[in-house]
Image (cartoon, rainbow, N blue to C red):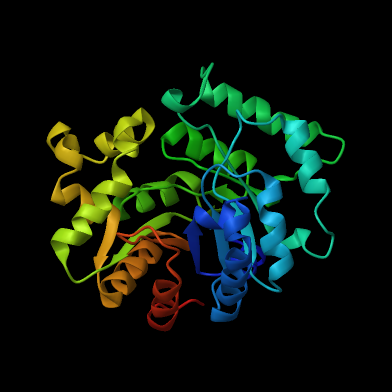
Amino acid sequence: MTQEAEQGIGRVGVWNSRLSSDDREFQDENREAAAELDELGYGAIWLGGSPGVARAVPLLAATRRISVATGILSIWNQTADEVAQDVAGLDPDQAGRFVLGLGVSHAPMTEGYARPYAKMVEFLDGLDSAAAPVPPARRVLAALGPRMLTLAADRSAGAHPYLVTVEHVAQSRAALGPGKLLAPELGVILDPDRARAHATARAALAVYLRLPNYVNNWRRLGFTDEDFADGGSTRLLDALFAIGDTTTVRTRVAAFHEAGADHVALQALRHDGALPREEWRELAAAVPLS
């Protein structure tokens, strides 16, 4: 990882979909939460839910130091020219804290889905040739498999893989090589009741068990049909999520870093789906953020 990248997003960030919402009901709290995350010392906010660049603008304006990233913008939702224009339109005083995360999405969620790797190559070409190009150093790819990881190394600052294990982090580092950003997401459930925590994990995992890109990646890691049945086996859940107390999370974050991650994006999950502000505070006090 380059020194510039490490200074830009730090060692630990947060991943959350609600923070990317454009629903007016949530705007004030989202800005307040972003400002608090900045003060707590997190390095980056990753906006889930396939957000456009515009979704980062309110959070960039509400903060002074923390980076804000799309995690992950689907390349099927906009053209490369449109995305490049949106990036060029960011406030110059804030644009240096923005990271463009890109992904190929999934066939069940995308009309006309075909040849995703070629589509990503075409999209990156479009960003390079736009009137105001988005340089490789300002973009990362949601890479899971070997080909996309190689593309991330060749055409971007690095990779932001989602729902992965410690083993996958190590494999990703080997594929990316040194000097490239590796910023995996890690689901976190702070709940001493393991049965309830596993129910929370299964609820979060349900949609992804229907997406071949994720299931195929888990198969490469040694999981089988038995692990995908009934909402996910305990073995799968415990490999994909840090479940328990803050000590469990701190240990898993350390394992991710030791396996080659530069930055870990923590997605704190609650059984009630509320914005996990208390969890973010607990984690900031327990997990080394720098």
Q: Is residue 99 above or below residue 44?
A: above
Q: Position of residue 252 (x, y in %)?
A: 31, 66
Q: Residue at x 52, y 19 (%)?
A: 111
Q: Residue at x 50, y 52 (%)?
A: 17
Q: Position of residue 288 (x, y in %)?
A: 44, 79
Q: Is residue 278 above or below residue 100?
A: below
The quarter of the rendered structure image containing the N terminus is bottom right
Q: Is residue 273 above or below residue 7?
A: above
Across the whole image, how many numbered discs are drawn on residues?
0
Q: Is residue 268 left or right of residue 76?
A: left
Residue 2 shows in the view? yes
The residue lying furthest to the bottom in this view is 285
Q: Residue at x 68, y 31 (%)?
A: 78
Q: Is residue 236 above or below residue 151?
A: below
Q: Is residue 162 left or right of residue 35?
A: left
Judging depth in this view, the residue of 143 and 58 nearest the camera is 58
Q: Position of residue 23 (x, y in %)?
A: 60, 51
Residue 263 shows in the view? no
Q: Residue at x 78, y 32 (%)?
A: 81
Q: Is residue 230 left or right of residue 87?
A: left
Residue 190 falls in which quadrant of the image?
Answer: bottom left
